[in-house]
Image (cartoon, rainbow, N blue to C red):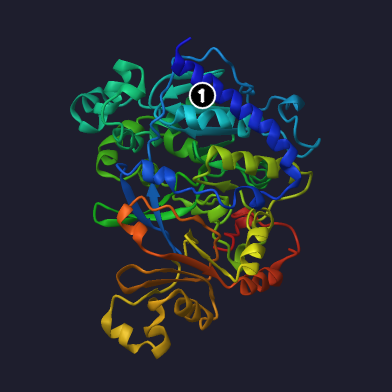
Amino acid sequence: MSSQLQRVVAAGVVVMVLLQVWSVAWQTPVATRWAAAPVAAAGAAGAAAEAVTVTVTAEATTTVTQTPTRLPLATPLSASLPVTAPAPAGAPLDPHAYPHLPPGAVSNTSNIALLIKTGATEALRRIPIHALTTLTHVPTYSIFSDLEQQIGALTLHDSLRDIDPTLIATLADFEFYTAQQRLRDPETAPNQSGAWKLDKYKNLHVASRALALHPHADWFVFIDADTYVLWSNLATWLSQLNASTPLFLGSIALYRFDGQDDLFAHGGSGYIVSRGGMAATLGAHPGMPRQYESAANRSCCGDHVFALALKDAGLNVSDARPAINGDPPHALRFERRMLCAPLVTMHHVSPRSMLDVWAWEQRETRPGRVLRWADAYDEFVKEEFEKILAEGGQRSGWDNMATNGAILPLHNETAQAELDGQDQKAHRSAKRCRGACERRKDCFQYKWRSEKGGKCWLGDIVWRLGDAAVEPDLERKKYEWTSGWLVERIMEAVKEKVPCVGEAAFPWVGGEKGPF
């Protein structure tokens, strides 16, 4: 066995051992275990990756950044992983597929097809943790990459195999794909940042293959490899909707394309298409993936191209926030209005954090219970906020992602001059920045950095925990970086809504959109 393969197998064993260790920690809120772990290092390692900014139709702006992880892919591993084989749609549920959940906690979900999209450069890092967590819940699933692969007992389908050969031969976007196919080892392929360029061609082809692989499924749930699905919540939600109705559910984002603003469902957050929706679009137009390959070449993202094609076929995306969510546990954007809403997905979830979320889900899932945003607050951030309060409400070297309000000083000099005297000076120190937040009734947090005379970010409406600040730009390390929260104000906002009263309301059940 090669040393590389030995390292890969050893990593898999370590993950399984970690999983056993984590079971002991289920009774401890996750916030106490990962609070100080930096999460920005992955972004630093992938500085060559491309970032595309899309505007979410609310207060925030989402930056969609996908970084190819440069980990080697071995040839098929001899070590198999404990996975549940896909079951035919409608088949009786195997109770042994849910060994960690109480009886009756999860209903028969073999009618839900889970489709995971990844890439060969990240698959070995991202997929095994799903085999140990999410896929132990899921009877019906398929995994798609940009290379036909085998990881233990898991088959990864090449989502690009049906691309027009002329495009593969002529477009620079496919140079990396061609190298992968020839070398069969992504680690040795040149220009690995090219993996991101391939991603935008995948989504429609993934959906077409999914329809062929799972023709009897009622629901098609599309996620990225760093997306976590709270499966019990998903099953409860979809059981309340009519799968024969054409539905396309996701977290809405906006992208400027060919001179117009297109709404689409953010792929990393996950999106869902009903049986009726698939039949009316890809089922009725089987040539759709090929027809939109030129659009993919001009677009930023495959999730945008997917939504564009479905829209042209008559099916628009319906906003399913906050159930469909694009943030990981430490960066969840909490608001008063959504604390009692159900939470179904998280994005940018590292393998380590997936163990945390999975342990929480197993511990808290029981018949009739829906996990809500308030439950996530209790599990992932509440204890950390209590520590922050004891620390004086402020931390140095921490990024709490406060970006939902004003940034002081204002870029517009006239507007800056019109601010009151105190706010005009809010950027000069962390203390003054905190004062500006305290003077705004809807401000919950702030962030201050000493660069260029100081800059103050105010976080209105939303509060987030964030994580230790790790700057990929070495030049910025000379700046002071301080984050602060009005913790007592946050706690009062939570008390106004929690405990939640009444049943959890999922988006579009009974035609109701939800809090967004």
**Residue located beneath label 1 in the image:** 213
Mark 1 is surrounded, within 10 Å at the Cα level, by few (under 14), some (14 to 19) or many (20 or more) other residues, namely few
Q: Is residue 76 left or right of residue 500?
A: left
In the image, 343: left or right of 57?
right
Q: As rendered, which of 343 and 509 lies closer to the eye?
A: 343
| Furthest residue toward right | 103
Q: Is residue 302 left or right of residue 166?
A: right
Give the residue furthest to the top.
Answer: 1
Which percent across, then down, holds residue 430? 45, 74
Q: Is residue 169 above or below residue 504?
A: above
User: Could you say where residue 72 lies in the image, as x and y percent from the top left?
Assistant: 41, 24
Q: Between residues 216 and 407, which one lies in front from this camera angle?
A: 407
Q: As drawn, is 240 to the left or to the right of 486?
A: right
Residue lying at the far front in this picture: please name it. Answer: 478
Considering only vertical position in the picture, is 149 above or below 308?
Answer: above
**Foreground residue among 85 and 208:** 85
Q: Nearer the viewer, residue 237 or 244?
A: 237
